[in-house]
Image (spheres, rainbow, N blue to C red):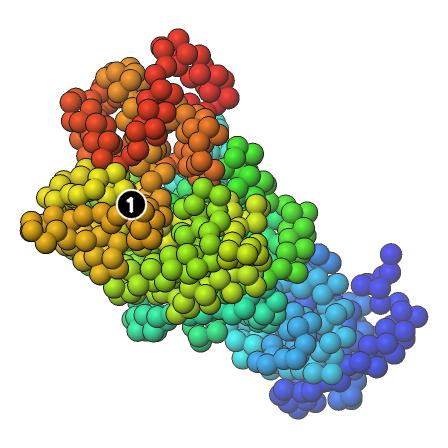
Amino acid sequence: MLKYLGLDRPFLLLARKLLFTVVRTQMLSETPQALGLDPDKPVCYVLARRFVSNILVLEREVMAAGLRSPLDGIAANGIRESRAFFFSRRSEPWFGRRKDVGYSPRLERLTQAVRNRPDFDVQIVPVTILWGRTPDKESSIWKVIFSESWSPRGGFRQLFTILLHGRQTLVRFGQPVSLRELVSDAEDQERALRKVGRVLRVHFRQQREMAIGPDLSHRRTQVDGLIETEAVRGAISALAAENGGGPNALLKAEDKARRYAWEIAADYSYPVVRVFHRFLTWLWTRLYDGVELHNFDTVTGVAPDHEIIYVPCHRSHIDYLLLSYIVFQQGLMIPHIAAGANLNLPVVGSILRRGGAFFLRRSFKGNKLYAAVFNEYLHMVIAKGFPIEYFVEGGRSRTGRLLQPRPGMLAMTLQSYLRDRNRPIVFIPVYIGYEKLFEGKSYIGELMGKPKQKESLFSLLLTVRELKKNFGKVHVNFGEPIKLTDALAQTHPGWRDEPPLDETRPAWFTQCVSGVGAQIADRINNAAVVNPVNLLSLALLATPRHAMDEDQLVAQLDGYRRLLEAVPYDARTRLTSMDGRAIIEHCERLSLLQRHPHALGDVMHFPQEEAVLCSYMRNNVLHCVAIPSLIACLFTRNAQLSREQIGNLAKTVYPFLRAELCLRWQPEALCEALDRYLAALVELGWLTQSSGREGIYLAPNNISDEYIQLTLLAQAVRPALVRYFISLSMLTQQGSGAISADELEALCHLLAQRISLLREFSAPEFFDRAIFRTFIGTLKQAGFASEDDAGKLVFNGALRAAAAESRYVLSPDVRQSVLHLTRLDRGTVEQALTRLAAKGKV
C-alpha cells in the first residue's frame, strides 16, 4: 500500500502531470501569502474532503505563494509530522455513503502536543476547494450530475467531476486560527477535539453555502435529529425494554431506528432534479403528443400562504414523475413524494430519493418503532414547509375507477398539523388522464387472477420497448383546493381548544379524516377530463362485439358530447373539443381503432387486444355519465315512467353507485341532478315527455335510432347493477345470519367470474373484489344489513324489497341467470369457502 493516499514520489509526479492538464484554479479570496501567517509558528492546512486531487491543488497554490509545501511536513519544538495537512473527514468511499467517522490522527496528535507543551502552537488554515459551481443552466446532463453539491462524493464521482469541471476549480484559503486558542479552555482531549471539529465543520459549511446554496438534504443532515425526537426515543426505549433492557438492547434499538430513518428519508438534490427535468422533457416528447394543463392557477393562488399537499389520482408510475415535472415547469418547488417501498430498487431508489421521494412500507401494523420514525419524518417535512405529494388511494387503480381513499397518510398529516400549527395546510386534488397506459396489460392480467408483478430492475428495463409506441395526450387538471382548517371547523368547531392528541384518537378526528378523504375523491372526479378515447370506449364497449357502423358511431359520440355539454359533471370538468369523426380519426392514429371496409358502410371496431384495455379508459369517466346511464337503464326496461317513479328507483340504487364511483351529489341533491339530465335526454330526443299527462316520460320507439342510442348509454352502469343484484341475491339465498361479509365478498367474486364467462361481461373489472367490498360496506352503512355478535350478516325485509326492484332495470334473462347461479346449497357454499380459506382469500 502507498505510504499516504499513495503520495510516494513517482505517483506524485505522474498525478501532477495528469491533473493539471485538465485543471485550472481560481482564487476566491486572498492568496496564501496575504493571510498574515506567523513565520515562527508551523502551519497545518485543513481540507474538507480526502482526495489526492485536493492535496495536489493545495500544494500548487501554497508553492505558488512561495510558502513551504504541505507535503514537507512539520518540524518545530521537537514535534515532527510527515505532512502539514489533515482532513476534516477521515475517509471518502468509492461508492455509497461514508461509514468511517472520527477525527484525523494528525489533528489528535497536534492537539495533544499543544495541550502538553506551553511553547508549542500551530496555525490552522482551512482551505475550501470546489470543483465547479452547481450550474444554473447547463447544456450537458453529465456536467449537472457531477457538479458540486452537498452529497457525499466518492472517488469514482470525483474522477468524473475533475474531467468535467476541472477548469472551473475554485480555491478559498480561510483565515489562520491558533490551535492553542481553540483548545485552551477545553477540560480534556476529547472536548478539545470536539471543539476543533465543530469550528471546522461550521467554517466549511458556510463556505459551501456561499458557493452553492444551502444544504437541502433531509437524509444526511436530519436523520440524527429525527432519532433524537421524543417520540422516537420513547419507541426506542420501549423496544429495548421488550428485548430485555440494558445498554446493548438500547444500542440495537437505536441502530434499528436509524436504519428505518435511512430507509425512509429523501435525499433531495438540485442537480438530480435538473437532470430529471431534462430527461422527462425528452420522455414526454417521445411518448406523448402533448401534456395539457388545466387550472394550475389553483395552485399558484394558495402556494404563498399554505403548506401544499398534492393528492392526485393514481393510475400509473408516470403520475408522480409527471406531476413533479409540471410543478417544476411552473416555477414552484417540486413536492416530496411518498413512494411505496417496492420502488426502493437498487440504483432507481437512490435516483428517486434525490428527486424528492421518500419511501414507506405498505403496513406499519405491529411495528411501533417504524411507525414512530415515519410519523416524525413526515412531521419534520410538513413543519419545514416542503410541499408533499401522496396518493390517498394507497395504490394504482387496476380498473380505472377512483379507489376508495385510505386514511393512513391523511391521518398522519392531520395529526402533524394539530401538533404544530405553523402554517395552514391545503390539499390540491389532481386528476391525471391518459389516452393509453404503460401498465395496461399488467393490470388486466392481475384482474384476471395473475399475481401482481413485483417491481424490479429487469421489469423496468423491459419498459424501454414501450418507448416505440404512441400514447396520445395526457391531461392534468387541478381540482378545487381543500383547506384543512375548514374541514376541521366543519367536523369539530372546537378543535383549536383540544389538548394534543395521544395514541387514542377521538371520534371527531376519525370523522374528519374520513370527510377529507371523501372530499378529495369527489374533487378529483370533479376535475375529470373527458378525452376522445374515454368517449370512444363508452360507445364501442356498449356493443356486444365492440363494433359499430361508422355513421352510427359518429352519431353516438356526438350525442355523448351534447349530453355532457348540456349538463357538465362539474364546473372544472373538461370535455374534448373533437366531434365524432375527429375522435375516430384520432383513435385510428393511436392504433386503438380499426376500420373494416364494407359496401354498406365501414365498420369500426376495437382490436381484440385493445378492447379490454379500453374498459380502463371508459371507467376513468364513468362517473360523468352514471346518472343519465341509470335513467337509460330504467327506460330500456320500462316504456314509460313517472317522475316520482324515476326518483324512487334512483334513490334505491344511488347510494351504491355513489360509493363505487365517488359521485359528487349528496342524496338530497339527487332530485335536481335527475331533473337536469332528464331535460337533456329529452332535448337529445332519447326520451320524450307525454303531451297529455304531466310528469310522465316515455322511451322512444324501440326500432328507432334514438332507442338504440339510449340502450348504448344504459350499458355504462348496467354491469354495476348486475353486480349489485348478484350480491343481494346471494345474501338473500343464504339467509339472514348465515355468512359473514368476507365470505359474501368471496362468493360474489366467484359468481361474477362465472357469469362473466357465461355471458357477455368480458371486462375483468366486472368481478373485481374491491367493488363487492365497497357494495357490502354500503349495505351496512345504509341500514340494509348489519353484523351480529358472530360476525354474520343479518338483514330484514328492506333488503328483499331492494332485490325485487331489480326487475325495473335488469332484463328477465339476466335476472334468471343470476338467480339460478346463486341458488347454491349449503354444502356447495361451505366447500367453496373452505377452498378459498386454504388459499388465504377469506
Residue 713 visible in the shown view? no
Percent position of residue 513, x then y:
27, 47
Q: Position of residue 376 (x, y in %)?
A: 40, 50
Q: Residue furthest top?
A: 827
Front-lying residue, 795 or 386: 795
Q: Nearer the viewer, residue 180 or 271?
A: 271
Q: Is residue 585 left or right of residue 173?
A: left
Relative image position of residue 559 (x, y in whole percent): 33, 60
Q: Quadrant of the N terminus?
A: bottom right
Q: Quadrant of the C terminus?
A: top left
Residue at horizontal 17 percent and vertical 43 percent from the top: 640
> Who's the residue at 40% across and 52% down the image?
538
The local secondary structure at tag 1 comes to loop
Residue designated by label 1:
702
Which amino acid does the dot numbered 1 rest on? Answer: Asn
Q: Is residue 791 left or right of residue 388?
A: left
